[in-house]
């Protein structure tokens, strides 16, 4: 973490990293990387199991968010799309976009959340999904790429 990175973690964050702490198939430790000039914000009462967070710009996670085993949240492409730039390790202009995860969201195991994703309050992401784009509040999405499955109507 650099001096210009910003990290904010709310109360009651639970992080499981041992394969014995979550028997749903956790196979890696939780890792969180916040690069220079990037921001990571995690709300209150969240729970993570063996997730990877990599923030090069901004990742904000709301309150009461549960993120299942082995999920990955990346706000960057990490490499150039252009083959010449990638082969020559050109790091300028690598695309990064903010990620926002609302309150009361449940992200099931083995989900990948890509740059620019916004997940609305009370939504659920099904296991194994690859998420990119905007997920409205009170909806269930799943698949690769993630698609709308149904609305959650029992929200007060």
Image (cartoon, grey):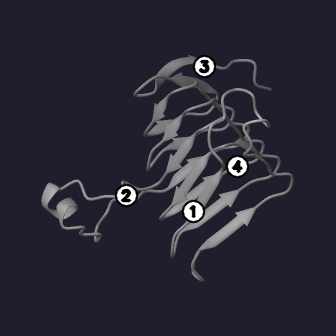
Instruction: Name the residue at 53% across, 61% down.
Output: 58
Q: Residue furthest bottom?
A: 3
Instruction: Name the residue at 58% across, 49% down.
Output: 52
Q: Earlier in the sequence, mark 3 or mark 4?
A: 4
Q: Earlier in the sequence, mark 1 or mark 3?
A: 1
Q: Residue furthest right?
A: 12
Residue 14, placed above or below residue 54: above
Q: Earlier in the sequence, mark 4 or mark 2?
A: 4
Q: How far from the left and from the top, in percent, is residue 115?
A: 44, 50
The residue at which mark 2 appears reads as 78
Give the side of residue 47 with respect to residue 111, left or right. Answer: right
Q: How far from the left and from the top, in percent, is residue 18?
A: 74, 43
In what element is the residue under mark 3?
strand
Which numbered dot is residue 33?
1
Disc count in the image? Answer: 4
In what element is the residue under mark 1?
strand
Q: Quadrant of the N terminus?
A: bottom right
Please say if the residues under marks 3 and 2 sit with CB atoms less than 8 Å apart.
no
Please say if the residues under marks 3 and 4 sit with CB atoms less than 8 Å apart.
no
Badge nearest the viewer, 4 or 2: 2
Badge nearest the viewer, 1 or 3: 1
The residue at which mark 4 appears reads as 62
Q: CA distance from mark 3 to mark 4?
A: 20 Å
Give the side of residue 77 with respect to residue 24, left or right. Answer: left
In what element is the residue under mark 4?
loop
Q: CA distance from mark 3 to mark 2?
A: 33 Å
Q: Residue furthest left?
A: 84
Quarter of the rendering containing residue 125: top right
The residue at which mark 3 appears reads as 151
Q: How far from the left and from the top, in percent, is residue 118?
A: 52, 44
Q: CA distance from mark 4 to mark 1?
A: 18 Å
Badge nearest the viewer, 4 or 1: 1
């Amino acid at each position: 973490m650099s001096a210009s990175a910003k990290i904010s973690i709310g109360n009651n964050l639970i992080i499981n990293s041992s394969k014995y702490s979550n028997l749903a198939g956790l196979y890696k430790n939780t890792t969180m990387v916040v690069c220079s000039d990037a921001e990571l914000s995690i709300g209150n009462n969240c729970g993570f199991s063996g997730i990877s967070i990599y923030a090069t710009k901004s990742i904000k996670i709301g309150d009461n968010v549960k993120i299942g085993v082995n999920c990955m949240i990346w706000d960057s492409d990490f490499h150039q799309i252009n083959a010449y730039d990638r082969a020559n390790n050109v790091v300028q202009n690598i695309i990064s976009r903010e990620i926002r995860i609302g309150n009361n969201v449940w992200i099931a195991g083995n989900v990948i959340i890509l740059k620019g994703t916004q997940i609305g309050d009370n939504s659920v992401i099904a296991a194994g999904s690859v998420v990119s784009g905007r997920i409205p509040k009170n909806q269930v999405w799943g698949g690769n790429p993630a698609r709308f499955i149904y609305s959650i109507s029992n929200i007060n």
